[in-house]
Image: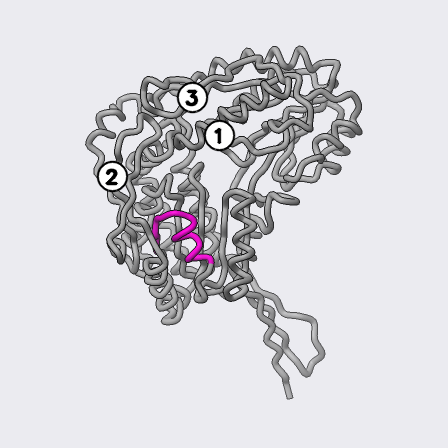
Amino acid sequence: MSTIDWTQRAASQKLDGRSVINGERVDAVDGQTFAKHSPIDNRLLGPVVRGQAADIDLAVRAARAAFEDRRWAGKAPAVRKKILQRFADKILAAKEELALLETLDMGKPIQYSLSVDVPSTARCIAWYAEAVDKIYDEIAPTPDSALALITREAMGVIGAIVPWNYPMIMAAWKLGPALAAGNSVVLKPSEKSPYTALRLAELAVEAGIPPGVFNVVPGYGHEAGEALAMHMEVDAIGFTGSTRVGRRMYEYAGKSNLKRVYNELGGKSAFVVFEDFADLQRAARTVAGSMFFNQGESCNAPSRVLVQASVADEFAKLVAAEAPKYAPGDPLNPSTELGALVDETQLRTVLSYIDAGHQEGAQVLAGGKQARAETGGYYVEPTVFAGVNNGMKIAREEIFGPVMGIIKFDTEAEGIALANNSTYGLQASVWSDNINRAHRVARALRAGTVHVNQYDEDDITVPFGGYKQSGNGRDKSLHAFEKYTELKTTWIRID
């Protein structure tokens, strides 16, 4: 990667913002577009289709036709597997192009677009490809006079609405199980990061996925997103985004055809450090790396750092010392660790939370300011607050930026209570050298994933999702097939 001049390559990159419907690039029905700028330096990337209800309708009709004529769903699982494996191979073959699109689109460092986002996307598609012909249905126990089959069938047309923080990976988490199961998909990427989704759709057709099976319509949430969620021919919505918009998904389903809704929403994950954990430096290094990765724009970011009082001051100093290692830099520089926030709106949101921390009495140990303003891009220093309590705004609301708050607690019971005192329940982490405590606390935490003496170690083989207002259903693992299939009982009488 060090031999590539990413700045030069970015300058010559040709970007196509048209929809992909029925296997072809198309303009909007009404010709509307919006201007897409890069958060790196506010450079104009080009016009992108501003999808409306008419565009969504074309895509859904194409998807429905593809499902009804069985051009994809009717293929043997082993055949779908081979095609999806070719799709994954094409993603890897286009890794430099896709990584550059991701970095230009939403500002993450090129080294991580290349080493994390692209291979994770390809692995997700390949894993579900491998899984699809290894999943067996069931036969229920019946008397000799009957045979009862329990089978899973493709649901039909899946609407996928994904966010801007991990555009490719979040899309793959929906596409992998939905396509492997035989569904057709209409994907609405965020207007803030549409380019990789559009390119993925082209690669899918090149790999042999029939036209109409995978369609992409960019646009705004209140236009294209709402139209997709309201469409009467969409059988399910897989949504990843804010809890506020997740609530609307249920409303849209209720107002339309009662389509299934699967929401992966926000988080305010607790990172709980006990005094008996010997290597505080490793814990501090881990929380800084996890919190500042992807500019803090991660739903599972460990932004609430709960530390037992006897070691809290020492731990705070260690974390503050880690922050400068994540100084914001040019995302196109291969050595940059922390890139740009996705746009000016997100920049202002993060800075407003930092102001709220000051006003509520928390103390900034590191960062706390805008950076690289002269570039025209949107950068914030990695920020560490101490003196935080769980009632503060920065401890209760999802910031989606590189801002963490350190909260002291005295007893194990208090630590558990503070960790669970949140409307969210996506992830959590426990740090203890006492195996009994580690198990005890992990069981007590109300979160979809609990890490013990680590954070962010993960794989496609395990489910991802949360408790409470962090959503319902699970992405990843074999459990994701449950979201995109219908369960059918076929009872056969035997005379």
Left or right: residue 161 versus residue 285 is left
- Of residues 232 and 292, the one nearer the viewer is 232
**Helix, strand or loop status at disc 2:** strand
- The first of marks 1 and 3 along the sequence is 3
Q: CA distance from mark 1 to mark 3?
A: 21 Å
Callout 3: few (<14), some (14-19), or many (20+) C-alpha neighbours within 10 Å? many
SS majority, magenta: helix
- The stretch of residues the image draws in magenta is 215-229
The residue that mark 3 highlights is 337
Who's the residue at 42% across and 28% down the image?
A: 341
Who's the residue at 40% across and 44% down the image?
A: 190
Who's the residue at 51% across and 58% down the image?
A: 252
The residue that mark 2 highlights is 46
Q: Amino acid at mark 1?
A: Thr
Task: From the top left corner, tell me how far across and down residue 95 is, in percent.
Answer: 32, 37
The residue that mark 1 highlights is 349
Q: CA distance from mark 3 to mark 2?
A: 27 Å
Q: Amino acid at mark 2?
A: Gly
Left or right: residue 309 versus residue 384 is right
- The first of marks 1 and 2 along the sequence is 2
Q: Amino acid at mark 3?
A: Glu
Res. 213 visible in picture = no
